Amino acid sequence: MLPYNIHHVAIAVEDLDAALEGFADQYGFEVLSRETVEEQKVEEAMIAVGGSHIQLLQPTDPMSPVGRFLSRNGEGMHHIAFAVADIEAALEHLKERDVVLVDESPRIGGGGHRIAFVHPKALAGTLFELVEVVHDG
Ligand code: CO
């Protein structure tokens, strides 16, 4: 039950509209979806890049995790998300290896997907996210 793909690379931005315009102008990428995720206090947009995505995150609250990331680091890469078929099994796999998790159990993220974050101190100083991708139809 290991990841089979990179679902998205997430980038924290100060101004979502400006960033979307930049991705459209410079690369011709189009916006797939845009929504506010209250639980994470972000407005997020997904851009399709082949079979994967770039996720842009603009905090709605400066004290939120993404808000604090921006004030510490400025704009830039925030996390890499792996697609998994079964998020419970993927979390179990990591727990068996004593991997430090941010989320011990799945929660609901953008697009209604079940997600969980793995702590950046676990590997390569990078925040990883697991996304359970459910295909409808
Ligand atoms: Co993400």
Image (spheres, rainbow, N blue to C red):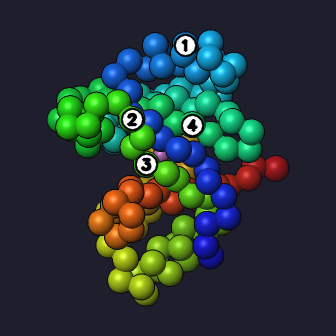
Kindly identify the amino acid type of the residue bearing the numbered disc 4.
Answer: Ile
**Disc 3 to disc 2, C-alpha distance:** 10 Å
Q: Quadrant of residue 105?
A: bottom left
Q: Is residue 131 above or below residue 41?
A: below
Identify the residue shown where x is 62% and y is 76%. Answer: 1
**Disc 2 to disc 4, C-alpha distance:** 12 Å
Mark 4 or mark 3: name the one nearer the start of the chain: 4
**Secondary structure beneath disc 1?**
helix
Identify the residue shown where x is 62% and y is 54%. Answer: 6
Q: Are discs 1 and 4 less than 8 Å apart at CB?
A: no
Kindly identify the amino acid type of the residue bearing the numbered disc 1.
Answer: Glu
| Left or right side of 24 for 39 | left
Identify the residue shown where x is 51% and y is 60%. Answer: 130
**Where does label 3 land, which residue?**
79
**Disc 4 to disc 3, C-alpha distance:** 10 Å
**Where does label 2 land, which residue?**
76
Mark 1 or mark 4: name the one nearer the start of the chain: 1
User: Looking at the image, can residue 50 be seen?
Assistant: yes
